[in-house]
Amino acid sequence: MTIHIKVNNAMHSIDEVHADTPLLWYLRDELKLTGTKFGCGGGHCGACTVHVDGEQMRSCSVKVKNVSGRNITTIEGLSETPDKLHPVQQAWLEVDVPQCGYCQAGQIMAASSLLAKNAAPSEDDIKHNMTNICRCGTYPRIKKAINLAAEYLAKEV
Amino acid sequence: MSIKNLTSSNIKPLIDDNAIASDIKNKKNLSRRGFLKLSSLATGAVVFAPTIALADKFNHLATIDTYQPNFFLTLRSDGIVEFAHTRLEMGQTPGTGLINIIAEELDYPFEKIQLKQVQYNAMTAESINKINGGVTGGSRSIRASWPIIAESCARVRMLMIDAAASIWSVTADNCTVQEGQVINKGSGQKLSYAQLLTKAESTPQREQVDVKKRGDYQKIGRPRSNVLTKDIITGQLRFNLDHHHKDMVFAAIARCPYRQGDIKSVSQASKDNVLNMPGVLEIIEVNKKEFIGFEQKSEMVAEANVRAGLAVIARSTWAAFAGAKALEIEWQTDMEMEDNESLMARYHAAIEKEGNSLFALGNAKRHFQQNKQQYSQLYQVPFNTHQYMEPLNATAHYKNGFLELWAGTQCPRRDVEAIATVVGLAKEKIKVNVSATGGSFGRKFVPDFTCEAAYLAKKLSTPVMVVWTREDEVSLGRQGNMELQQLAVTLSDDHLPSAYHWKTVQSEGDTFWGNPYMLHLNNVKHELVHEKPTLDLAPWRAVFAARNNLGWECFVDELAKKADMDPLAYRLKLLAQPVQYTKAPEGLPWLLDYAQNVRLRYANALQNVADRIQWQKTRKANTGVGIAAANFSGTIATNAVEIEIIENNIRINKIIAVVDCGVVVNPNTAEQQVVGSIIWGLTALFKQETQFKNSQITQTNFHDAQVFKMHEVPEIEVHFMATDSGPGGLGEPGACAIAPAILNAIFSITGERIRKRPLTEYSLVSA
């Protein structure tokens, strides 16, 4: 059985030897898409968050064979074109969210997935959906950036 | 400060602070001394080997593409200025702050200055050690580099003026500088620095230059975004874990779970199984007996304390992880078996012992013998792990007798020393590439993870990256120190302390005894008792201040209660007491000035933060306020909190921080640091306690070693005081006052005094 996944609009055929490898490590070590980070390996911290068919997923906790045929987006493919930032990235830049920055790709993927489903999240929606860990303590700015991104998205429509 | 003498145990900002503290009152002195010490460095060509080589080369060039007038700056003909960055980017954004200082002193567009991380190697080590001890830590990156970088930039600014003046045949007085251009005041002609490179290269540098005065700053104090932000949010910033090298292999290590111990036996079947796993290449024993320096009981080997274990070498990270997990190893140790309770019991016994005297003045003992009015309490904090987001990892490549290392390390100098001792290489043969890292908070100061990579690299011909799993991080984690402290005072009739005795028990390492509330007393005694270490340690954000302040700030609240006074009013009364000694005690020439200064700054900041939370306001039942201050890295950081208690739940309505760090270089990142530090302190108060049993940590990952998530974070408001002190650091001080402020607020509501963290009596409810 050959596994096929689409990552950032490029098709990849995957050797069966990698079938049980977590998606995270296939992205990082094989495809060299290192924007997706390893934080805990147990689905707790969200540093490895990617989109699978538009839904946020913690890539450390899903095997490659279980996303066969699915459409995966990583931080490198979030914006439509390389020279244009996604509105969530734009908001992150404006608010200057990151400190060390390690968790931020995961935070951005989680936030963009939230906003795709809920264009105007309440304070509670944000708190309950954003469960990614940041040890530098950027949470207040993340919240601010999500609200700003919601404004950007509202203007886009 | 002798940088040579910095070791892990005294790498505290203490030494630096003391030196600076003595000159706080007279900034001129501070600058002069700073320059005397550093000016030979700043002139560049004299000291810096790389500069000598470059300067030599320039003599043969008619026109030049780049000009490196000193260690820090390379001016390119395309107008970009490269800044030689010698600090680690791990979240505190020192590079952005230093670029802002360069933009100010060089008078150059901020956007055209780029960070260029300097490799730590035989050519650069001496210079880097002189600049910063080869360390990023102690919240000193900006404050300690500032004088030398400012002078280097001012020198270049003057050089450009002189070069242009010479071209225009006018005096320097007739020229001015703006955003990288020298302007001829008379004719209006302009020449950019880039246009002046060739001329500047042959223009002599002045003996004496003036850096800008605080009142003249145009850029320092202007908010700047972290220069790395765009790369971070697009996934382009390469952290150490993201650097792939040609033919690189990966290593995961099954390590001994004890601080001291070794492999007893390994199941051959499990080894065979692992060797048959796809992607696995080989298994290498990490055998401490092979370490050069092991038999001689080298201090560096002991300090790095690389754990014994089996390393699985594989083609991918995942294969290495899976292999290491599948190994079945029995471990042995002759350590005493301790758990949280037994170790704390041992600390309680040890607090009765006579400790090493840290500082004593007068005759505190006699006061305690003669004065019936006494008060004494014990405060305790547990071991804490760091739980930064990027797990430890390091890559090493041994080739042609040289070892090259890539790591997100806080101290390449110690990496080189440790690697030289562990694997037996001359220091000159080791090169360290410092990569951005996903948080450290003190942990990546310890060179164990870099030694592991070097050890394996020497046995392999390819580059090897050692990666720790989160389980490795938590269950083998190095700890912020556990502490039990005893505070005791004798009291005079006005309820103020007349003598003070402080004793602390911790497993090893240093501390700082200078409790600002007691610094005026001339009958004091401070002692440190070391107990046998059970877990490995590493510096932990704000090191001693994060521990000591819990006791200092709650104890002063207790004294206020005994005096039947408002906690703020009592603090201010105590801080207004004159220092009782008139000249600095022997061996501590800085103490008198320091005591006066820190007490004044405390009083001002506490009053400020209290006003902002409306301290005196009548509040509804079950709602109360608490206050606390901290002093670290030259910065006073205070917190006032308002909380509400509903049964066994706490709701934090508001946290206000007032910070006196003197000059704020970059208000944007300064605010980030204070907010982040407060969340760090809240996490320690409400969540963190390393659990261990049989001298092994029993937690494994974020589910059982929890940290704060977004829904738990209350409203935090940060203010900076404009003062003429400092500059103080900002990466750590904000973490120290929040826990005592909250415990004090709890007391104001319940009358119940909690003397420890973590806080297990109450749960935090979402704000």
Image (cartoon, coloured by chain):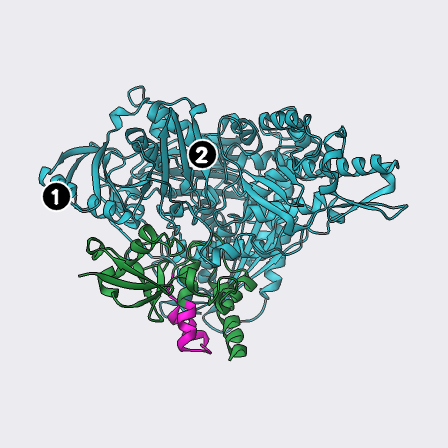
Residue interval drawn in magenta: A111-132
Q: Main secondary structure of the magenta part?
A: helix
Residue A85 percent location from the top left of the image: 51, 65
Q: Is residue B495 above or below residue A84?
A: above
Among all residues in the image, which is located at the extreme top? B296
Q: Secondary structure at mark 1?
A: helix
- Looking at this view, is B458 or B54 the one in front? B54
Is residue B197 rendered to the left or right of residue B265? Answer: right
Disc number for residue B242 = none
Which residue is depicted at the point 72% across and 37% down?
B197
Reading the image, the residue beneath label 1 is B273
Is residue A129 rendered to the left or right of residue B676? Answer: left
Please tell me how many numbered marks the rendered image carries: 2
Q: Mark 1: which amino acid?
A: Asn
Same chain, labels 1 and 2: yes
Q: Is residue B301 above or below residue A107?
A: above
Q: Is residue A119 magenta?
A: yes
Reading the image, the residue beneath label 2 is B432
Q: Is residue A152 above or below residue B310?
A: below
Query: For chain B, what colour was chosen?
Result: cyan
Q: Is residue B593 visible?
A: no
Looking at the figure, which quarter contains the N terminus of chain A? Answer: bottom left
Among all residues in the image, which is located at the extreme right? B186
Q: Which chain is green?
A: A
